[in-house]
Image (cartoon, helix red, strand yellow):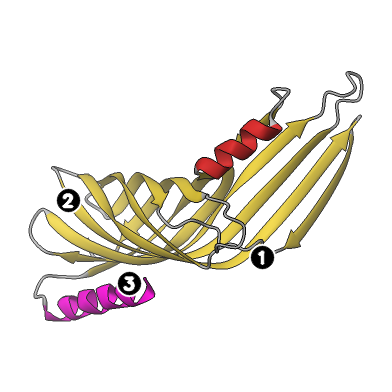
Amino acid sequence: MKKIALTLFAALFIFTLQTEAQVRGGIRAGANGATWGGDAVGSFTDMMNTTGVMKTEMNPGFHAGAYLQVPVSQTVSFEPGVYYSQKGMQVSQTFETNSFFKPQATVTNTSHYIEMPVLMRVHLGPGFQVYAGPQLSYLVDNQVRAEAGVLGLSYEQNWSVDPGLRKADFGVTGGIGYEFAQGLNLQAGYEWGLSSLDEGKSNFDAYNRVIKLSVGYTFGR
């Protein structure tokens, strides 16, 4: 997988050097809403959610990075980029063993990735765009936060942990966007992980799922 990604980036770099079209750079940042998908996640939730008080929620995060726009034609361009991105999931549980105390607990797993998407961007008309392409992500850190509370008292613990997550994550991403004449652009996208996050040690079949809202700026417009 890594060899394929490196070959793809090398070919794109050579194409960038050879093309006569103007290559522009830009920066982009925005918010993430991340969770995990897959059969194992659903089975775990169904098993634990016997009282109807356990729920999985999106883990809020952010992403930021830079990109290049390489025009292929008047309506199509390639866009490789490098980003830092936060993913993961959140699980919360209310224990109804005692109707008065009702203790609550929340566990949040935040995975820190370096992403390298290679997108094809199609310009549909004045400003409007759609984009899609493959993406290789590399896990650089994983943090877990546990929170518990009862009767207004709370406890919180944070630690870095490697729960057997796969370092390299391959997926696809796509979405829609709008670019203003001055170079400012807005976009909304979705990331669909194709590599199971488990390294194969526990057969936990889970995949990254991320909603992204971004604002960016392309230089040289």
Say which residue label 3 marks.
5
Q: Residue at x 21, y 63 (%)?
A: 78
Q: Earlier in the sequence, mark 3 or mark 1?
A: 3
Residue 6 in the image: above or below residue 210 = below
Q: CA distance from mark 3 to mark 2?
A: 22 Å
| Image location (x, y in percent) of residue 33 | 52, 43
Say which residue label 1 marks.
162
Residue 97 in the image: above or below residue 120 = above
Q: Is residue 162 visible?
A: yes
Left or right for 149, reference 187 = right
Q: CA distance from mark 2 to mark 1?
A: 39 Å
Say which residue label 2 marks.
122
Q: CA distance from mark 3 to mark 1?
A: 24 Å
Residue with the most extreme top position: 99
Dividing the picture into quadrants, the one containing residue 7 is: bottom left
Which quadrant holds the N terminus? bottom left
Task: Tell me the SS state at disc 2.
Answer: strand
Q: Residue at x 79, y 38 (%)?
A: 105
